[in-house]
Every structure is written in structure tokens, then in C-alpha cells.
Image (tube, rainbow, N blue to C red):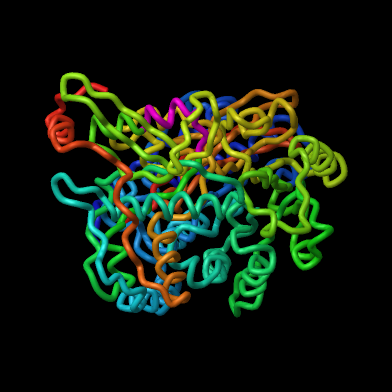
Amino acid sequence: MKPQPWTRSLLLIPVLAAFLGAQSPTVKPGRTESIPVTGEIPDDPALAAYIAPYAAEIKASFGQPLVKAPQGLFRGRRGEENLLGYWVADVMRESAQGVLGVPVRFAITNSGGLRANLRPGQLKVEDIYELMPFENELVVVELTGAQVIQVVREGLLRRGGEPCSGVLVKVQGTPAQATLSVTWADGRPIDPAEVVKVATTDYLYGGGDSIPTLKKGRKLITTGLTLRQILLDRCAALAKAGQDLLPPAPGRYQVPPELREALREKKLSL
Amino acid sequence: MDRRAFLATLGAATTAGTLLKGAAAPAEAASGRITLLHTNDTHSHIEPFGPGNGALSGKGGIARRATLVKRLRAEAGASLLLDAGDTFQGTPFFNRYKGRLDYRLMRMVGYDATTLGNHDFDNGVEMLVEAMESMERLQHRNPPFAFLNCNFDFKGAPSLEKRMRPFMVRDFPGIRVGVTAVGVAFAGLVAPKNHEGIGWRDPYESLNPVVKHLRETEKVDLVVVLSHLGYQMLDSDFDDLRLPAHVPGVDAVIGGHSHTFLDTPTRLPQALGETLVFQVGFGGVNLGRMDFAVHRGEVRAATGASMAVEG
């Protein structure tokens, strides 16, 4: 542990002013004392020793095989769809449904939060940690259908389309005059007034990255599940069922190449 | 003034206050002080947050928290170490050890009481009880800590019911402290199969008779509520900020659920005085502290602050 100067954290505790002020002539009411109470805090040796074998066991589990991914899952290069992101969004939506026991119609995450591809072959626990090193939590909020469409639009305009689950997105027309169409995954139209449950991350809901409409979500439910954990759980479930991890089908974002280029160069309005 | 001198002054002033008022009873019986140390929503963050976690990076860790608690308790004298629930879920430690390690470590740190947050039901009632049992069975000089709640009906879950208490009372020199607790509604937060047999009741209506009992029958000087309702919940009828108006006579609310980072307690007036509402983020990155000085059942001074747990 890195030693820190003792004075790094000074805590200002207001002296119990009303009490002391009335009783002691030496302390004025409202006076504040500076009392260092933190600074360098070493581990308690007994607890550290007790934790060590458990922590070692968890670290050892990083090398454990998870599931086979014969094709791998990739974030997609220029002009390709983010199939890894689609898989993550699918797992988010299905996990949220499992936790809540009610339909969750839409899920969205940010491609910037996916830190590594899953290379073809046998996946290990550590591969999921590389993909998702953050403690980002799965959360569920309520949005209207109109807000779901706006969330998709913001993701398109700012990041060229963020990984999502539950919808089909088409951008058509020309760079000068483009139109956006968003339907549910089965092709049914989205009722702008309908209130639906939406899975996302605490990071995006909290205003991280670039989808401001997500912040308008109501009735926040924090699941306590990290994204990493639900991905680990999904891989384990597939392996247990004797299945491979395969990428979801492409086609969620249908954007012609010239429009995709215009999106990337921020020359498109939708 | 250093901490020891500050505390010595407070002690002297407490005694002086009694003498000045000409009390016949011994000074220590009429006046006392207590330090409440507290956490909430630690979410199985046994180790400090790793890099890549923004402002939380490098903070927290229960072994460090133990050191900080030990230091503060050595200096503070009368103290309670309390938690507002959601110990479970958040790291591989929970996935692998099912909360048993979390509760055992809490006992080793010296917790006096906690309550149940929604995530403490994430593996169902049976696994929750197994984690409690694992903590009780630990060979350790610290006694097992208490599980408090007054607004859940545990009748349909007897194995859990026998481990829950609606409140506890602790005596310290010159001060008697009552602690109770309330939890958030299960709907939308806990899958029905995971809270089978447990009912939820209005936390304000549940608290009022308990607070009255603590004050009038148990004759406590200070009432503390561990709340897993959340600090400010606009979509709910119940939160810590509205609690004092509905439940007078509570001196301190140690809150959780909303992961709210407060530097100091929010002070709210209520019918019988003032309530300090506090909450210190989540993941064990901070330790909360509130200090109360009482004289004959009346709070004379109260203060508090959040302390970072960092190495």
C-alpha cells in the first residue's frame, strides 16, 4: 500500500458548538476544529490475513474455462455492426426481465464501455473481466416509446449507433435528407405514449457518455448486478447447457454506407 | 486542539453542565455522549475499488475500515458501529461466498447491528439465513451483531424471524441508546420467490409505536433508525428526508439504498427536536460518524461527518 501523508485528509468536525458554547468560556459557538482522522489507513492485519485466501481463490478462478465461442464476438470495425454489443445488450435485457419478472422491452449500453473483443476459442473468466473491467451496474428505468426512439437517435448521432436490444433501427434517404425508423424487434410499431421498462447501466443513466434522454427515465430500479456478473452468468449457463456462445444475428442497425459515413462525420441530422 | 483534548473538553463540559444545573444525581447518570459509526450499501466490496472506477478508485476495503473503526473507537469511548443494509451483491466475493464472508468480516470489524436491504434477499431467504448462521458460528471475540427491522412481517419465514429483532437498547455511561430499523418495499426490487413469507408494512406507521416504546418504556436518551428507504425517493411515499415529519422523536437516521454521498448529516426539525439524516455513499468507500451529547434525555449537541476510507 502506498504511504500517504497523514495530513492528506483533514476532516472538519464542527465542535459541538451549542453545547460547549454554553458551558465553556474557552470555546466560541460555531467554532470549527480541524481534526485529522483519516490520512494513511493500513489494513487491519487480522482481517487482511482472513481475506487473503478467499481473494486468492477468486483470482485463481480467472483462469477457469467458461464457454467456447468458436466465432468470437467482435465490436465491429468500420461499417460493421457491433455484434458483441448486441450480445451484451441482449443479456442485459434478459437478465433484467429475469430479476424483475416483467417484460423489459429495450436495453442499451455504450460501445465505449466494452473494452475488449472476445477472441474465437475457449473463453476464460478473465476474458469477461477484460471486456468489462468496470463495476457498472444493470439498472432498469421506465421510458415512453417516444423516449426510446429519442435514445436510439441520440446514440446514432453521437456514437453512430449504440448497442441495443429489442428494436430494429433503419436510417434511409440521403445525407441531406435522412429519416429514422425505429420499430420493436418483431417489426411492430412503437407507440410513442406507451411506458416501457428499459435496461441500461448506472453509468449511462447517471449521464455518462452521450444519451441525455436516458436520464429522464423514471422509477429507477438498481439490480445490484454488475454487467460483468450477468455476462459471466450467461457464459456459465451456456456451458452448462452444452452450448457455444455465438454472436447474435446482424441487422439491428440498417444504415446504408453513405449515411453511416455521414453519421461518423457528424454531417447527418435525424 | 487535538482529538483527545477535544474529547476531554467535551467530557468536562458534560460534567460541568450537570453541576451547573444543580442536578442531584451523579453526573455520569444524567449526561453522556455517544459516537455512531456507520456504513451503508457496502455491496460485498471487501477489497478496495480497483483502478478505472473514477473517484472511487483505490478507496474502501473492509480491512482498512477495520483499522479506522479501531482507531476511532479507541478515542471515542462510547460508540456503536451500525450499517443500513445492502451488504450483499456487487463483487465476485458475493457470487462465490453468498454473503457468508461479508457477514463474518462485519463481525470481525465489530459491528453492533445492521438491517436488511433489498439486495440482502438476492439469493432468497434460505441463503440469507445461512449467511447469518455462518457469522454466528465464527469463533471470534466479538459477539454476533444484531439484525434489526420493525416493518417486515417475518411470520411466514420462521428461520429468519428468530434472527430478527424490532429494536435493541444499549447502555453506556450516562446515555441509553435505542436502535431500530426499516426496509424498502419489495415490489419491483426483490423477486417474489426471494422474499417468500415476508410481508412489508408502512415504515412510518411501523416506526411510531417502536419509537414511543423506546422513549416511554425503555426510557432511552437517543433513538437511532437504520433506514434502507433511500435519502430522497420522488417515486415513493417513503424516504429519509420525509421520515422525521412522520415519525417524531428520532434523533438519527442512518440511511442507505440510494447510494447518496453526503459530507455531513442533513438536519431536519421535527415535532420533538431535530433529526440528523445521514448516508455515506456505497461500497464502503466512506465511514460515517455522528456524535451526540445528551443531558437527561435531551440532545444538547449533535454533529457528524463522512470520512474517506483510503490508504
Expressed as whole percent of the image width and height from the top left, the position of residue B159 reads 77, 68
Q: Residue at x 65, y 57 (%)?
A: B113
Which is nearer the eye, B66 or B231?
Answer: B231
Which is nearer the eye, B108 or B86?
Answer: B86
Predominant secondary structure, magenta span:
helix
Expressed as whole percent of the image width and height from the top left, the position of residue B115 reads 65, 53
Q: Is residue B164 shown above or below B97?
A: above
Asked if residue A148 lies in the magenta stretch, the reply is yes
Which is nearer the eye, A245 or B168?
Answer: A245
Q: Residue at x 41, y 67 (%)?
A: A44
| Left or right for B81, reference A160 | right
Quarter occupied by the N terminus of chain B: top left
Looking at the image, which residue sits at the far top?
Answer: A177
Q: Hey, which quadrant is residue A209 in on the image?
A: top left
Residue A31 in sight from this viewpoint: no
Q: Residue at x 38, y 42 (%)?
A: A108
Quarter occupied by the C terminus of chain B: bottom left
| Left or right for B195, reference A185 | right
Expressed as whole percent of the image width and height from the top left, the position of residue A57 reads 39, 78
Asked if residue B270 lies in the magenta stretch, the reply is no
Q: Is residue A173 shown above or below B288?
A: above
Q: How many marks?
A: 0
Residue B256 in sight from this viewpoint: yes
Q: Is residue B191 shown above or below B95?
A: above
Which is nearer the eye, A181 or A92?
Answer: A181
Q: Residue at x 41, y 52 (%)?
A: A90
Q: Which residues are magenta?
A: A141-151
Expressed as whole percent of the image width and height from the top left, the position of residue A52 reads 39, 76
